[in-house]
Image (spheres, helix red, strand yellow):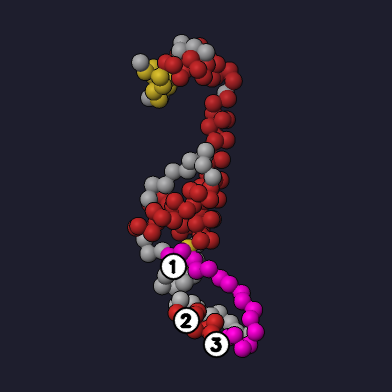
Amino acid sequence: MYTNVSKGVLAKSKDLIAAFGTDDQTKICIEILEKGELLVAGKEREAQLSSQFRDIATIVMQKIVNPKTKRPYTISMIERLMHEIHFAVDPHSNSKKQALDVIRELQKHYPIKRSPMRLRITIPQQNFSSLLEKLNAWDADIVSKE
């Protein structure tokens, strides 16, 4: 059984009883008007989800690059792509796990690539040529030699 609370929002009677202790629409409306807590809680939840969405986008931005330019995408571009794949934040799951899921999903639809691992290696000069051979075999980019 569903009860229309307001503006077309449907709720199950058992959910109303759990939340308000009654499924009497009049009593519920009066309680909402008196306390005004649902609106505040809704805004707080929306702010939390928006913040978590931004956190996830930031993590994604740090972990991917444009394969043509080898430069990171901007945060606004990542957020736009997340909206386009209809990503929805799960407030009960951590942001890093969700960011990795977003990366996998984005790779299915857009030309993105995981950022390459960056290493700083200090080795004796006599071992340099053998290391260079191995790095070349892995298609590694050497940023600088000091």
Quadrant of the image for the N terminus? top left
Assign a secondary structure to mark 2.
helix
Q: Are marks 3 and 2 in contact (CB under 8 Å)?
A: no
User: Is 107 in front, or is 37?
Assistant: 107
Q: Earlier in the sequence, mark 1 or mark 3?
A: 1
Name the kind of residue labelled 3 in the image.
Answer: Ser
Q: Which mark is residue 136?
A: 2
Q: In the displayed structure, would residue 114 be above or below residue 9?
A: below
- First-in-chain label (3 vs 2): 3
Q: CA distance from mark 1 to mark 2?
A: 22 Å
Residue range of the region highlighted in magenta in the rendering? 113-129
Horizontal and vertical percent position of residue 68: 41, 72
Q: Position of residue 119 (x, y in %)?
A: 58, 72
In which quadrant of the rendered image does the C terminus lie?
A: bottom right
Residue type, label 1: Asn
Assess whether residue 117 is covered by the magenta stretch.
Answer: yes
Say few, some or many: other residues with alpha carbon within 10 Å of mark 2 (under 14 / 14 to 19 / 20 or more): few
Q: Is residue 103 magenta?
A: no
Quarter of image, res 129 = bottom right
**Disc 3 target residue:** 129
Front-most of residues 114 and 62 = 114
At x 58%, y 18%, the residue is: 34
